[in-house]
Amino acid sequence: MTLSLSLKTVAVSAAALTAATAFIPAAQAQDASIDEFRIGILGGENASDRLRSNECLRTKVEELLGVETKLFAPADYNGVIEGLIGGNLDLAWLGASGYAKVYLEDPDVVEPVLVKINVDGSYGYHSIGFARADSGIASLEDMDGKVFAFGDPNSTSGYLIPSIEIPQKGYSMEPGDYFGDVVFSGGHEQTIVGVYNGDYDGGVTWADGLGEWEDGFNSGAFRKAVDAGLVDMTELVEIWRSNVIPEGPIVLRQALPEDVKLKVTGLIASLESMDPECAYSFMAGEIKGIAPITHEAYVSVIEARKVKMGD
């Protein structure tokens, strides 16, 4: 199928952001309607790094709501998805494909509330194919018979979009048809490190595509890997780039009390202005802000996911 993912720049007025954050008090007594708050973290890094990246958000939510706030970092994307579907998680930053899976399983479980805004004002990113610079691989044409690594079956950039767009370029994703093998590494960090170490010939991961390659772009999995000292980007080369993908939503469990949803949404919406360092850590790099988003932004991805589920 042909997937249309046209990007519309999000324009959020100062008045709207002010309204979204005006209700945040400096401190909050315990909310009597809940006794704990649970945040799920998608895979992509090792568990300890994921917990560290989200700890500042956890402490802020705990202080705001006055209830124990816990982080959960399952081994794969599906752990967060099933946690949301089962009502065992209250908040997560999902990829668009992950949100699509949750919605297709039960449209009443979560609601998208916020999205990351890039430094140029857009809210999109790319799936980036890459290889080692010394491998002689400069494009998909050079991947004939090579091992191509993808992150997770429930990742938008790490599988869904490449699995649609790469075959449209004439390269079958069936192992052995064109690529020597098509494998899942387990997550974005594993793909990046695996290609860097020569375990895979090529791989895909996500990035906003803005800024410098040497820095790992402005935000995304490359930037996280560079910040962690895992890779030297000059030893890698881009070999493919997807069309723009709508950035995945921050979602909240629909059954949460409305005042809790408002407080948490306002807190996260104001995170970049209140605590840029925490926003950088939580949002995987440099951002302009965090703005409102609705279900309608993900209809195309939901349709694409529905088709893949029927394959």
Image: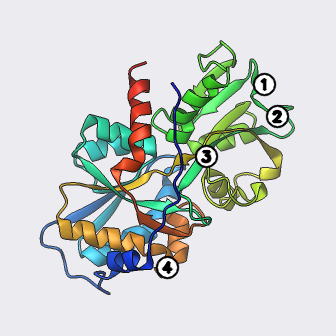
- Residue indicated by mark 1: 141
> Around disc 4, counting alpha carbons within 10 Å, would you say few (fewer than 14), some (14 to 19), or many (20 or more)?
few
Separation of marks 2 and 1 at Cα, in angstroms = 8 Å
Name which residue lies at 42% across and 75% down. 270
- Left or right of 228: which side holds 108? left
Separation of marks 4 and 3 at Cα, in angstroms = 26 Å
In the rendering, at what x and y percent does residue 148 appear? 67, 28
- Residue indicated by mark 4: 273
On residue 209, which mark appears?
none
Q: Amino acid at mark 3?
A: His
Q: Is residue 52 visible?
A: no
Mark 4 or mark 1, earlier in chain: 1
Depicted 275 relative to depicted 117: above or below: below
On residue 126, which mark appears?
3
Q: Amino acid at mark 1?
A: Glu
Depicted 104 relative to depicted 60: above or below: above
- The answer to whether mark 2 and mark 4 are in CB contact below 8 A is no
